Amino acid sequence: MTIHMLFHLRFRQPQPSIELSEEAKFRRVVNGSFAASARHLFADIKVSLAEQLQLKRLEELAKDYMSNSDLENALMSLNSRCSGISRVYSIGKSVQGVPLWVMEISDKPGKEEAEPAFKYIGNVHGDEPVGRELLILLANWLCDNYMKDPLSQNSLSRLALQATLIVDNVHLHILPSMNPDGFSLRRRGNANNIDLNRDFPDQFFHMNDDPGAHQPETKAIMRWLDEIRFTASASLHGGALVANYPWDGTENKKKYYYGCPDDETFKYMATIYSRSHHNMSLSEEFPGGITNGAYWYPIYGGMQDWNYLHAGCFELTLEISDDKWPNASELPTLFEYNKMSMLNLVASLVKTGIHGRIFSSDEGKPLPASIAIKGLNSTIHARETLADYHRLLVPDRKYEVIATMPGYKPRSTSIMLGEEAMTVDFVMDPVITPINSFLRRGWSCSLPGEAFSLVVFLSVMAVKTNGVVDGILPEELMKLLMSLATKWGDVLDLKNLKVHHLSGAMTNEVYRISWPTKNENVPRRVLVRMYGEGVDRFFNRDEEIRTFECLSKKGQGPKLLGQFANGRVEEFIHARTLSAEDLRDSEISSLIAAKLREFHNLDMPGSRNVLLWDRLRKWLNEAKGLCSPEHLKEFSLGNLDEEISLLEKELPTESQNIAFCHNDMQYGNIMIDDKTKAVTIIDYEYGGYNPIAYDFANHFCEMTANYHTDTPHIMHFNTYPDFEERQRFVRAYLSSSGNQPSDEEVKKLVDESEKYTLANHLFWGLWGVISAYVNNIEFDYMEYARGRFKQYWLRKPELLGASDDLLHVDDSAEPVHILRSKDLC
Ligand SMILES: [Zn+2]
């Protein structure tokens, strides 16, 4: 298996075909386009008769639900009944001015304690009101059962203990309704008809980047997270029965399992909920009653991922009833079904994981250090004031816990975490070096806004250099950023640097760093990529860097702005990834063609030998080694050597332009800036020298794929571009230099490309066969391979068979020279 393939698998992955609930299907339709347009989809829809009927039905049902003022009254009276352990506060107002009331439940509400904080949020979607009712019931139940002597209780004794445990050891914040306007309008969105669970900043796409443009309800949540350090949380939804965990989106918009760095911990959390639930874990649709969000259906701008990324808060999205708006008489039953789950999830913050405080050895002061676990690419932060931290982790495992703080020597300790929670405190020694005393003076203050603050970012970097804070790396990057800022005429105020963690990808850590410019509305943005450890298994880092660097110098892809010991600073590209439809849009297609020509014209280092044939043979050997006898036979792998040799002989090469080809021009690897129409080709893992006709062939075949469907593995060859469309593409390609090609020239290249589709079918067919054996991702690789091989055998006679002149191959033709260029870049 080649390193390139492994890498590719990550990005090509493909969606499993799973049955979606009606709710999910609905959401897919509504949010299928997750660009900004999704926000406005509702606005223009005329209210149909069916919707009117639905509205009427909800009006009926709503009579027995609490109105917004009922809810307010319920909270207030509960607060006076349980004043010792509760307080009510508002985090802001809805569009229509309804306060977003929160009840905090704790033995010391409103006071700072070295305890974890948890939040429950209900009614994010206006037409999913079960959560708001259950949360009021939960608050009441806690109030009633706190300090109840368990011995005097019957079977509820254990749960009553849970109430006392939670109140005494957790600060539980309950926001029953995040969307009171949507509730009174009986609809999903808020008063502006915006889906609040698509309104948060997104790690992959930039539709919600403008801080001023968020809905008031969203802004309230964002402020809230900056004020309170929540360890974990959950939002309550309806329409399905499952505990959903990050990530909710993927960077290529495709649907597949995409775990965040704390995937194991999230699965553990989600399982706590589903297993404690009356019947969630028995789900037939979702094994164990849990699901990865992106695997179910990707969404963008969701609250869950943002909590984890921005605030290190482990948030679940809980779908707690199949019926979004059940009859109110069912609410007591639904509460019984969810009660133990809701309690156990909160209690898990105390009963499991590691907890501790961090102090300096010299003055004994609390240090708001960062806590990382070796091997997990995520960091949490101790609280500013008390320097306490709380981290959920899967029990019964060994961990190495690392505390870092700028200006202090990092400390690490190995622990064996059992079923019970564990206390791990740290005492840290200061180091006195110029850079670190600078850091201690200038950086230990809290940076507002971004959870992945610069302090933490630098600490993470320090941890990555084998646990040694030597100050060199941060200094190196800082100098780089400073010089970039100076070059651009910005005044870089260190306190205004914002660091946003963009991706939990396993290969790299990617951060968006921004700072204000003179033009207040336009912050400067760069992308910082920290090379991950152990990626050599996937691809040759040196080669990747060389290709990237070279392409960047040649104005392709993101610009390389600077490099440091274990990472680089890249241009931040404002563009969207194309969709399947975009490839068929004649205007966009012409832009792609022109860009591809530019790409092919690049003088890239490395071997100029056509790599196609060697790679096909190598993959064939791998496939043969992996395949069962049945598959060997089914795919005629024994005969494919001959087919490859035949193609190598029959496909035109000497007349062909050999160029640095992308070799994977699928829509997910192409970006476009809709404003400037600038096209960017990304992800060059498969790049290498090939006949340009091969790149065309690959691109034409990709036009029949749509990786955003329930059957992503099926390529629809009946939609293969016709001669006209292929000609248009090739003409746009050839004429992009300014010279109009002759009809003959265009036709020749189109015809030759057509023959190369045969090689392309073998290429991806073999890729599919190998992947089916080595990859666990639920994409039907084997069926995909079948489709490609079938096309090969189907088209071969027509493309190679009949023509007589194919038999007269001129063997005396000069072989393609092997060139190895030096220092081209
Ligand atoms: Zn919902």
Image: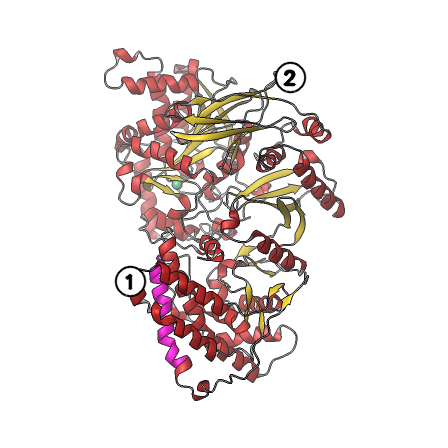
Q: Quadrant of ligand 1?
A: top left
Label 2 – label 1 distance at C-alpha: 69 Å
Amino acid of disc 2: Asp
User: Which residue position holds label 1?
Assistant: 629
Determine the secondary structure under disc 1.
helix
Of residues 33 and 233, the one nearer the viewer is 233
Q: Earlier in the sequence, mark 2 or mark 1?
A: 2
Determine the secondary structure under disc 2.
loop
Left or right: 126, with 523 as reference point: left
> Residue 449 is drawn in which quadrant?
top right
Left or right: 483, with 364 as reference point: right
User: Which residue position holds label 2?
Assistant: 362
**Badge 1, how many Cα within 10 Å: few under 14, some, many 20+?**
few
Question: Vertical placement of 445 versus 186: above or below?
Answer: above
Q: Where does residue 327 sit, x and y in percent of width and height?
A: 27, 36
Give, as a single range, the part of the protein colored magenta.
780-799
Q: At x 63% / y 42%, what residue is drawn?
A: 513
Of residues 227 and 398, the one nearer the viewer is 398
Residue 729 visible in the picture: no
Left or right: 443, with 70 as reference point: right
Of residues 447 and 9, the one nearer the viewer is 9
Q: At x 33% / y 49%, what residue is drawn?
A: 20
